[in-house]
Amino acid sequence: MTDPDSPQVGPWFEACPYGVVLVSDGTVTAANGAATGLLAVETPVGESLADVFPAAVDRRVPAVFGGGDPTERHEFEEYYPDLDRWLAVTVEPVATGAAVYLTDVTDRVAAEGRTDELAGRLDRIATISELLSTVLSQLVDASTREEIAETICTRLGEVDRYGFAWFGERAPASDHLEIRASAGETGETFAQVRDNLETTPECRAMETKTVEVVESLAGDERVPTPVRRAAFADGVQSSLAVPLVHGETVYGVVGVYANQRDAFSERACESFETLGVVAGFAVDAIRNRDLLSADTVTAFTFEVPGAGSPLASVTADTGASLTIAGTVPPDRSHLTCYVDFEGASPETVVAALRSTPAVDAARTLTAHDTSGRLEVDIGAGTPVHTVTSLGATISTAQFDEGRGRITAELPSDSGLDVRRFAETLRRQFEIDTISTVRHDRSPTTTQELRTALDDRLTDRQTDALRTAYLAGYFQSPRDSTAEEVGTALGITGSTLLHHLRAGQRKLLDAYLDVDAGADPTVDLDADSSTQERSGR
């Protein structure tokens, strides 16, 4: 490595803790062990300095010696890909040429890089959280689906962090994905997305009901080729597709495109997923509000075969007739139905229901010899569950001899929903509508009372009162205990009593035409067994 008799070196040379390379006229005259180890060479003496140093990103060392041995001091840091190492390099002029001093600074550079990356990530998370917080607060005040679409696109598409954003939903007649709103500097990329919607990540997000991330638009083969080419030309590097989901229903999708490759971290995706859930809930709430306040509704009547309906198949197996008296959706995975039956024993009907894969649970509420009322939890992917998840209200549903006939209502002034409803049933269950009747709602006292109560009762109080009523909790003697009704709602018996008492107080306030006072409360931390005994 070095000539120990050379006057340039001495015992200090090999003992030096950092690398030292001596150069004369561009040729290495000496190199200590630390230097040969850092440069991964064995016998550099006599070799050209350009050949001894591996290729670096900026090639600063050959540049310093390009005009001969340097006459000035140079200091810099370089990354050497072949070595996978960062070196701090100092070049000092000496009497015989120049000395090159080397120090490995890889760990320090990596630590600084991680710190900068973390700081940048935290900054992006804070910015995204603030942006989405603004969007979510505006969604709460949105009054139409169009307003929801415009709010999301405008807030996301007109910020520096993202290039553009768009909102799309299925067309009711063709079931094709269509763009309803967009914002931002769309360019050619947006035009190609619009022309290739059925093969985009947004389409997949609607099918899977999950967020789809593309970190490299130009290089991801899942992206349509025209979109990839346009994204490369426009400098658009990444995208995020967020489905708007509530229950089993996908109401649309939001596509967000960014000019940075790391625009959508795992934390950012979680935040956007929340946006999709809230936006889906907002759309669903608007649909339900439109149904409740509509002056004119469209009633759909259709038949379902036993193969597509658990209730219809049970009538074929048992000979019983079933009628849905009411429904309560306690969560997204199933629909709780209160079903009147006749023509078979309760044991026979319940056993048949429990053996049906699409039925999650079934129990008897009231029973006579061959009639009574049941509580049945029906899973997703069935006609009755799909009807309610699409925002319709089941007005009648009767099942007999292996077939069922269901009538559901939707607001007539929402033509888009009416068409989508019929098309979805046809596509998913091969069910054709038997009749479609549009009729006006009469301004009855009952309807006026319900409208007034909508403003007073919370959703949970409404669900609690309806479930308890249909389950026979208010009968004497009771058909269900507080624990059983609470189980149907996914809450404890004591919590149920809290909601029932608050709801009953509001009902009495409305009926007696008095100002609603403070809601009655139940101390949920008190002995729940005492509360349950008082409610039985």
Image (cartoon, grey):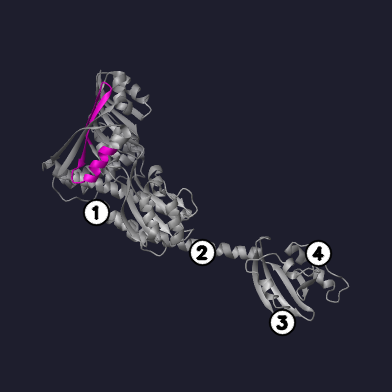
Q: Is residue 265 above or below residue 474?
A: below
Secondary element under disc 2, as helix, strand or loop, is helix
Q: What residue does disc 3 label?
A: 71
Secondary element under disc 3, as helix, strand or loop, is loop
Tag 4 and tag 3, C-beta contact below 8 Å: no
Q: Earlier in the sequence, mark 4 or mark 2?
A: 4
Q: Alpha carbon of mark 1 to alpha carbon of mark 2: how far?
A: 39 Å
| 220, 439: nearer the viewer | 220
Residue extending furthest toward the right:
5
Q: Earlier in the sequence, mark 1 or mark 3?
A: 3
- Nearer to us: label 4 or label 2: 4
Q: Earlier in the sequence, mark 4 or mark 1?
A: 4
409 magenta-colored? yes
Rate crowding at label 4 as few (under 14), some (14 to 19) or many (20 or more) other CA atoms within 10 Å.
few
Magenta residues (range): 394-423
Q: Alpha carbon of mark 4 to alpha carbon of mark 3: how far?
A: 26 Å
Q: Where residue 115 appears, x then y in whole percent?
A: 56, 64
Q: Where residue 252 appears, x then y in whole percent?
A: 33, 48
128 magenta-colored? no
Task: Give residue 43's mark.
Answer: 4
Quadrant of the rendered image containing residue 19: bottom right
Q: Alpha carbon of mark 2 to alpha carbon of mark 3: how far?
A: 41 Å
Q: What residue does disc 2 label?
A: 119
Secondary element under disc 1, as helix, strand or loop, is loop
